Image (spheres, coloured by chain):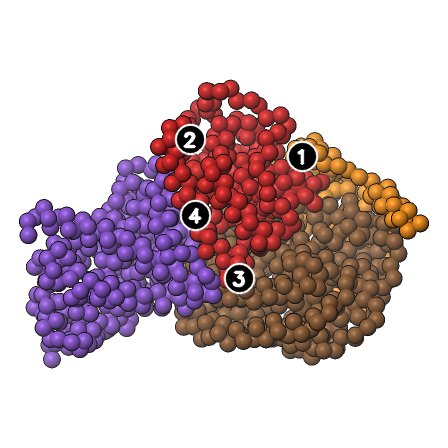
Amino acid sequence: MSNKPDLLHGVPEIPAGSVPHANGCDQSCFLGERPDPLSYKEAIQTVKNWFRANSLWVIAYGTGCGSIELRPLGTARFDMERFGIAMRPTPRQSNVLIISGYLSIKSLKRVIRVYEQMPSPKWVVGLGSCTINGGMYWDSYATMKVLDLYLPVDVYIAGCMPRPEALIGGFKELMRMIKNGETKGYIDYIERLDWYRENQKQIIKDWDLPDYSW
Amino acid sequence: MQTTLQALKNQFTVQWEKQQRADLHQVGLPREQTLAALTWLKEHTPFVQLTHMSVVDWIEEDQFQITYLLMNPRSYDLLMVCTRIARSGATMESVHKLWPQAVTYEQEMNEMFGVEFPGSPRQGESFILEGWEDIPPMRRDFDTVQFVLDHIPDRPGRLSINTREFIGRKVGEKRLLHD
Amino acid sequence: MSLAIKIAWSLLNVLVAIAYGLVTYGVVRKTMARIQGRIGPPIYQPFIDLGKVIFLRTATSHGVMFFLGPIFRFVGGVGLFLVLPVIVGVPALENFSFNGDLLLAMYFMFFGSLGMALGAAEGGHPHSPIGIGRGLSQMTSFELPFGLAVVALISVGGSFSVTEIVQRQQELGGVLGWNLFQQPFAAAAAFLALLGMNMYPPFNIVGAPQEIPVGPPTEYNAVFQSLMMSGRSIFAIAKTVMFMDLFLGGATSIPEAFLKTFCIYMWTVFVGAVFPRFRTEQSIRFFLGWPTLAGVVAVLLPLF
Amino acid sequence: MTEQVTEKDVQLWVGPQHPGVTGNMSVQIWLRGDTIQMGRTHVGYLHRGFEKLMERRKFIQSFPIVCRICVPEPDTNEYLLAAGVEEIAGIVIPEKARWLRTLALEMARLAATLQALGGQVGMMGLGTVPNWTYTLRDYILDRFEELTGARIYHMYIVYGGVRRDLPEGFAARMEEDLRAIEERLPFIDNLIFDNAVFRKRAIGVGKIDPAWIDEMGITGPTARACGVPRDVRRNSPYLVYPELDFDVITAEGCDIFARAQVRRGDITQSIRIIRQILARMPKDGPYCARMPNMLHWTVEKGQTYVRAEASRGEMGYFVVTDGSDKLRRVHVRGPSYVHAVSLLERMLPGTNISDLGATMVSMQTCPPEIER
């Protein structure tokens, strides 16, 4: 498990104080909460983060073979509901997107739409080696190799496949990060939307998505 | 099985014939007679079921081999009908009128190999790939590593090792330890 | 009791009812989990979910009507709760019950769902209208046996007032004085209709996640979802209070009210734990079958 | 088929993000009311180009790839690749390896069937049974972990035999797990087959015409639910299946209920087969033939088609070698290829939208084996 790596093909520096918004539509109003220097707001932020960390709603989208371990995780043996993690069937009501394993380029298109439809704050969990560096599909023409070029990943869970225990460990790490306010992936996605779009368009050849899927 | 094979030989020019297993025979037919032979097999012999359809790219000989696998649902015997077509401008007669599920196979082969099946309903529609611009990926001359290096960004730091050298070195180290 | 104090008490009742509904939902989730062999979430999990949802900001807009949908639903639940007496004889817990409140209660039961349907249809997602179609047709069918049961109670008691129905049962005295035993056919019709109202399996086709995820609420999130969640909990509690008043002789003390409503609620849960769901036309056929027959018998029986 | 669809029909995409489809695939449907007028299956969301990758890998390197073709049941893929190459290369595997391979295949079948049976009712909204069956499946996965070192992707079957011998005390622990499964089965029976609502939902729904079986090549439980005893284990025996005593379960009705009954019977038969294997397996002897150095191994030119019975039906591998140290071509013929594309599109017109997911699960659709 690692935090989001910060250098990948030269991340562009964001000048301080400027909020670039992409493609004419201003997303900054939907950013969700930003950290505020005032202390009482910090306290409120802590409370909010506690609520968020203890009620993770995962969207039911098995993007790859890793979803086979999500079902034992959800059922009686490993029971993720005891941590407050539940499956939600619609992106409008979910906060966590699990990229379960490799992501073919055809799927990536759908995943981007799903991710953008989720309300902020939202988190992405990359599951399996294939999301980190392509894994055993490094020479496959149909899959993407590095997930955090296209979506802001908060937690990676390594392994192929990661066991359900590892998944629980990953979720615990995610909860810890949310409680400490360390997850800024969703803000990063909006702020650097142009950069993400550029990467996405680089491998999605027939780009027909809207500017932003509301 | 043997009677069917004999009748097939009488009726059509069987280029080659091989018994792979007790229940699997392979025959090679010329391209012009394949559709007629398949129709005849379906109409007049117990080999009524199309189990599988596949393409093999023999790039050295500049040919595609198209394989039809027929099954006798009663005895479970298999008959593999192979035919060779030219690789450039590859077209083949469609069998979707004989077996409806062949549409999917033909759609896939059209997409992955570029073999045309004129008359098949879903030719040219995307089945697996989406927005593919390169040559069909399953052809031997499509280099997937080159494609990945050109189009799909990789995380820096991946090491490529020569397997033979690497294992040889490991084995060498082990030998040294033992010595 | 002055009106201001009455309003204050009623608001407090509403808040308690919402909290109690959330606790009940937590218990339901825990119970389901135990039946399935899981540990299950903590009982206070619905509160965390509600809190999280309130702290979200919605990024979707489909017009004013879309936003009004959950508000209608919430208001329907609160309205239903406010016309029902929780404990007859304790003015603080009688809410705004009056002569003829049963008619208003029946109206409020429809009102919330209709408002929700109006709003959800604005969402534009194809799953919403499909879910609405399913929900409204199923609702119409279970309203029939329930309506017949209520008509039977009214004709026997000769009053539209829930308070009087409760008092009549309490005058008869004892457990056997309850309408559950006095009017068994009406009770059967109503309790079977309750299965449909609470939307646990086998009658949860409206938002079946495996078919139309998740029906009418597909597009709602953030505060509107929190309104739906609290609306759902108060609606559930209001319905159980109504059933307690109509069939279980009301309540004379607060613990008794809690116990009776909890038992009524769990009846639908335990049925739901062991059944898959009906298709829409199958559930309609179910409600128009035996439950409606029981309702008709209940209405006709006093005539003979 | 297009003439059935008019402008007033609602077009709806079920999937790929949809809890009601089996995995990452999508079905495009045209609805009139709640009735589906026409359906089209769209796959490719899980495409990884396995067949291309195998052309670049040495023979032994192909095993990590094939086992990922069907996630719930990887061992059938491993066996078929091994069997195909062994047949061309003329390798005879030792006696014990045959038994161990059968054991792995049957355990995988049991695990996948349990998953499918739970998923069948789960898709109709009964969450209790899937919770139980997934746990029972996990017991089998524990034994797999003990046998092969991995929960999901085993890579246990290799050319010439298997990778490891049976661990100490495996049979006793397996017996314990089988007993646990058998103890739970009556409850599952009660909740599925005696359940009035499930009977209402399943009987007469998702019907197929028995005439389609020969025409389209329908296999496995889908065919057996029509009373046609199609089972590769019996019809074209492989490994030690001819020496084992088991029944081919059939049912009448061609509907979802009959398929669930066949699955339920398959669970009993798999348990029976596993017990027989563990009791009759030779205690010693090599578990893998002497193989040449895998780094330099070349296989002569040849082509073959091998098949085995997966839990979903007949699974086949078309293997072509060309005399080099790599595979020329492998083409996987999964049962879902026919079941979920051609057959499903034929079944959908006239179906209620509520039954779409249940129909797909009843054929145990596994998308990765369609697009690979």
Label 1 and label 2: CA atoms lie apart by: 32 Å
Same chain for labels 2 and 3? Say yes or no: yes
**Can the viewer see residue A62 in this picture?**
yes
Viewer-nearest of discs 1 and 3: 3
Label 4 and label 2: CA atoms lie apart by: 20 Å
Chain A colour is red
For label 3, the SS is loop
Residue A54 tag number: 4
Nearer-N-terminus badge (4/2): 2
Q: Residue at x 80, y 59 (%)?
A: D159
User: Horizontal placement of D302 versus B71: left or right?
Assistant: right
Same chain for labels 4 and 2? Say yes or no: yes
**Relative to D271, does residue C55 appear above or below in the rendering?**
above
Instruction: Look at label 2 and name its amino acid.
Output: Arg
Residue B154 tag number: 1
The chain coloured orange in the image:
B
Q: Chain of mark 4?
A: A
Q: Chain of mark 3?
A: A
The residue identified by callout 3 is A77
The chain coloured purple in the image:
C
